[in-house]
Amino acid sequence: MIRVIAGGKKSNGWLAEACGEYEKRLRKPFNISWDFVDEEKMPERVAKLNRDCFVVLLDESGEILSSPELSQKINTPLTNGREVVFVLGGAFGHFSDEMKQRANLIWSFSRLVFPHQICRLMLTEQIYRAQEIALGHPYHHA
């Protein structure tokens, strides 16, 4: 199972519809559950995660990965029964040093900065792409 801890309020309208298009295609263990929290409560929420969780922080200072690399990095813990937790900041997106130390992976979409709501959509699509790569399906064309 994949959990996304996202800063800010639950989205509605266009974003919920766009994310929903990818979410309905996801199959276990790549299915997503969303946990929306106030940005100031994120450190507390991350600190409470089970130590066995594979935690991925989305941060502009993180490692830039190809889609196949991301698929491999999250598929390995998923197939070993570990929960994968993505942590996506809110509008300000800053993470404490403690949160960065807890992360198993710090990942950046790009050196560009994107609005956090766009990042939710990009993350959902990349999780779907990772699933398709892991299953050997033709969605990913590289």
Image: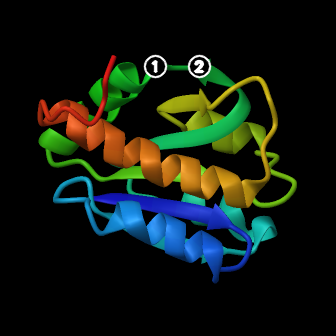
Q: Residue at x 50, y 30 (%)?
A: 105
Secondary structure state at the residue bearing disc 2: strand
Q: Residue at x 24, y 48 (%)?
A: 82
**Residue 66: numbered disc:** 1
Secondary structure state at the residue bearing disc 1: loop
Residue 88 seen from this side = no
Q: Residue at x 32, y 36 (%)?
A: 74
Q: Residues within 10 Å of mark 2 (few under 14, many from 20)?
A: some
Image coords of residue 32 (percent x, y): 36, 64
Residue tagged 2? 64
Q: Quadrant of the C terminus?
A: top left
Image coords of residue 108 (percent x, y): 64, 30
Task: Classify residue 24 as left or right of residue 93.
Answer: left
Residue 32 seen from this side = yes
Image coords of residue 79 (percent x, y): 13, 40
Name above or below for residue 80 compared with residue 112: below
Q: Amino acid at mark 1?
A: Ser
Q: Quadrant of the N terminus?
A: bottom left
Task: Classify residue 30 as left or right of residue 135.
Answer: right
Colour mapping:
rainbow
Name above or below for residue 116 compared with residue 79: below
Q: Nearer the viewer, residue 115 or 62?
A: 115
Q: Amino acid at mark 2?
A: Ile
Q: Residues within 10 Å of mark 1 (few under 14, many from 20)?
A: few
**Residue 132: numbered disc:** none
Task: Classify residue 114 as left or right of residue 35.
Answer: right
Task: Classify residue 116 as left or right of residue 32.
Answer: right
Image coords of residue 87 (percent x, y): 58, 52
Number of labels in the image equals 2
Q: CA distance from mark 1 to mark 2?
A: 7 Å
Name above or below for residue 29 compared with residue 75: below
Circles 1 and 2, Cβ within 8 Å, touching? The answer is: no
